Amino acid sequence: QVRLVESGGGLVQPGGSLRLSCAASGSFWRLNAMGWYRQAPGKQRELVASITSAAITNYADSVKGRFTISRDNAKNTVYLQMNSLKPEDTAVYFCNARIKRFSYVPESDYWGQGTQVTVSS
């Protein structure tokens, strides 16, 4: 069984910072790309940032220059450093990982349970 466990959400004032973490646990053959998505009330889930196993990153235009995604392959963990937070960043943030359980099967998508980020004064 593969699990993604997120931590680090909370309430922060505009202009503040938060760091999200997501650790993958369980039995699997390879952990490929990881990423963060978010979903605000009444809106569709959207990609915030992603990072490949080779550390190639991709960001949504709305967070470029403010958010930084990174990963620690030894710990099977991905991080999202969020700076200069704005009220419009308020959402539930979900961790995503593409994982091959075994060498002979395609990769599958796994999701964390979500963590609330609220930016408000």
Image (cartoon, rainbow, N blue to C red):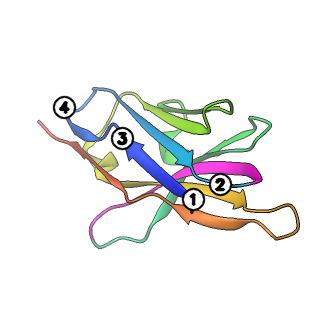
- Residue 103 versus residue 17: which sits nearer the camera? 103
User: Can you give x and y, in whole percent of width and height, for residue 82 in the image?
Assistant: 41, 32
Q: Are the residues flagged by discs 4 and 1 in contact, CB closer than 8 Å? A: no
The prevailing secondary structure element of the residues shown in magenta is: strand
- Marks 3 and 4 sit apart, C-alpha to C-alpha, by 18 Å
Callout 4 amino acid: Gln
User: Can you give x and y, in whole percent of width and height, for residue 100 in the image?
Assistant: 75, 60
Which circle's residue, 3 or 2, is located before the other in the chain? 3
Q: Secondary structure at mark 1?
A: loop
Q: Read off the residue under disc 3.
A: 7
Please tell me the numbered disc located at residue 2. Answer: 1
Q: Read off the residue under disc 4.
A: 13
Please tell me the numbered disc located at residue 83. Answer: none
Is residue 39 part of the magenta span, yes or no?
Answer: yes
Is residue 76 part of the magenta span, yes or no?
Answer: no
Quarter of the C terminus within the rendering: top left
Give above or below for 119 relative to 107. above
- Residue 41 versus residue 36: which sits nearer the camera? 36
Give above or below for 75 relative to 63. above
* Count of picture labels: 4
Which picture quadrant has residue 78?
Answer: top right
Category of crowding for the residue at label 1, using alpha-carbon neighbours closer than 10 angstroms: few (below 14), some (14–19), many (at least 20): few
Q: Which residues are magenta?
A: 29-41
Callout 1 amino acid: Val
Q: Which residue is painted at 70% across and 58% down in the image?
A: 99
Q: Which residue is painted at 74% across and 44% down in the image?
A: 52
In this rendering, the label closer to the viewer, 2 or 4: 2
User: Can you give x and y, in whole percent of width and height, for residue 23 in the image?
Assistant: 51, 42
